[in-house]
Amino acid sequence: MRAMKLGRLLRGSAAAAVVGWIGLGVVYDRSSVYGRERGGNEAIKQRSAAVDGTVPPRVVQEAALRGTSPINPLDVLVIGGGATGCGVALDASSRGLRVGLVEREDFSAGTSSRSTKLIHGGVRYLEKAVFHLDYGQLKLVFHALEERARLIQNAPHLCHPLPTMTPCYEWWEIPFYWSGLKLYDLVAGRKMLHISRYHSTKESLEFFPTLAKESAHGKTLKGTVVYYDGQMDDARVNVSLACTAALTGAAVLNHAEAVGVQRDAGTNRVTSVRVRNNLTGKEFDVHTKVVVNAGGAFSDEVRKLADKDVKPIITPSSGVHIVLPDYYSPDAMGLIVPKTKDGRVVFMLPWLGRTVAGTTDSSTKLTMYPEPHEEEIQFILDAISDYLTVKVRRSDVLSAWSGIRPLASDPSVKDTASISRDHVVYIGSDGMVTITGGKWTTYRRRCS
Ligand SMILES: Cc1cc2nc3c(=O)[nH]c(=O)nc-3n(C[C@H](O)[C@H](O)[C@H](O)COP(=O)(O)OP(=O)(O)OC[C@H]3O[C@@H](n4cnc5c(N)ncnc54)[C@H](O)[C@@H]3O)c2cc1C
């Protein structure tokens, strides 16, 4: 397994990426869809920055994909329209490459719309870095904190800083969480959103009136430590990435499924992908120099289209969230329980006028629409009820969803919580590039 920049695979790739920029509002220049415009960043920025831009209609996107041939292939065809796929399409097209993307459902229909919606470095990973003296985890946190700041800066209409409270019911927890979160601030350095700080019990209850003064184990609240991470509208950021990729020249098509992959008999390299329009049932071939597999939890299925004997690299793990009424939490403050009864982290976050609570982390079967299990919902309800004055009732659950983490697997590790959340870039012998794993927060790093 070796990581390699996609750009290195493609001779003639042009300008540096402007993938950090997310926006809408571009005058659509028809020639930009598959016109070989390689005017560099400035041309792309100008095209993308025009105010009344429109994304080319679906029929144009499909025609551009159908218009490829063995002598007129794409530079890159991306399979999967989640954070990873749309990020790759935007990065590649903003470098001046000729790009296509197919998504079998809608953009962000997979894991990318079912996250906790946090833009974070991962306090939990920092803890692992410190206690296991793991430099790799520290680097992960560092890079994720850089991306956190970048994402909020690039898409301030969809992302914002969010203060999150860590309750302390033992005296030792105050210095423990305080120093840990100060370290989190320190690792963020100049990218810090706001400084973390301790709040007395009185102040804490003013900020979070539903927080229990006494825990389920009879301990009184000694105060809280409040730190900052980001929160985003994950599905909308994802759709913005897809639209921005289209505006910079990529042909992005949803409801279009990769159903087959053809290879050159001589070189064994992937040359085209059979795509089915799931709205019409019609199939066509898209010719391409490189295929990027961004199928998320389904990455192994996509790899099997090219070679049915490939060794799986994904371990699917499901995470459930539930939506509760607004009165469970204040408008502008989240709550994190760093260690629940079984050692997992649970969040309670304000979300679109309601409260989202989650998440779980359990092994699961692979399915496009995983259903939240009753015991997972109960686990979240039990975990938060220990910390709230509100009577937590099953009937208060307004909705629930489950998402599958595309964890890049290490066969020697059984516990899914300890598998690295970093991404994997895997280049098969047939030239298919599989990009999987990692956090939403760090999509840009794995896509460039
Ligand atoms: C419960 C949970 C909570 C999380 N919370 C956070 C968080 O708070 N912050 C954070 O940074 N990260 C979080 N993550 C991680 C983050 O959501 C994922 O890393 C990210 O969404 C993965 O994006 P992706 O594009 O790789 O996968 P996906 O979003 O799953 O996209 C893959 C896409 O490929 C498509 N596809 C599959 N096969 C084909 C085919 N044959 N043809 C065409 N299309 C195909 C699928 O339909 C799907 O849309 C969370 C993950 C989970 C599960």
Image: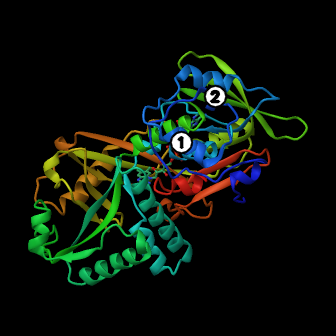
Q: Residues within 10 Å of mark 1 (few under 14, many from 20)?
A: few
Q: Residues within 10 Å of mark 2 (few under 14, many from 20)?
A: few
Does 11 sit left or right of 160 as displayed? right
Residue bearing mark 1: 46
Q: In the rendering, at what x and y percent does residue 208 appear?
A: 14, 62
State which mark lies toward you, 2 or 1: 1
Q: Residue at x 42, y 65 (%)?
A: 122
Helix, strand or loop for disc 1: helix
Q: Nearer the viewer, residue 195 or 84?
A: 195
Q: Quadrant of residue 290?
A: top right
Q: CA distance from mark 2 to mark 1?
A: 15 Å
Q: Name which of mark 2 and mark 1 comes first in the sequence.
A: 2
Is 253 placed above or below 78 here?
Answer: above
Residue bearing mark 2: 31
Q: Residue at x 40, y 78 (%)?
A: 186
Q: Nearer the viewer, residue 79 or 172?
A: 79
Q: Quadrant of the N terminus?
A: bottom right
Does 426 sit left or right of 172 as displayed? right
Is 375 placed above or below 340 here?
Answer: above
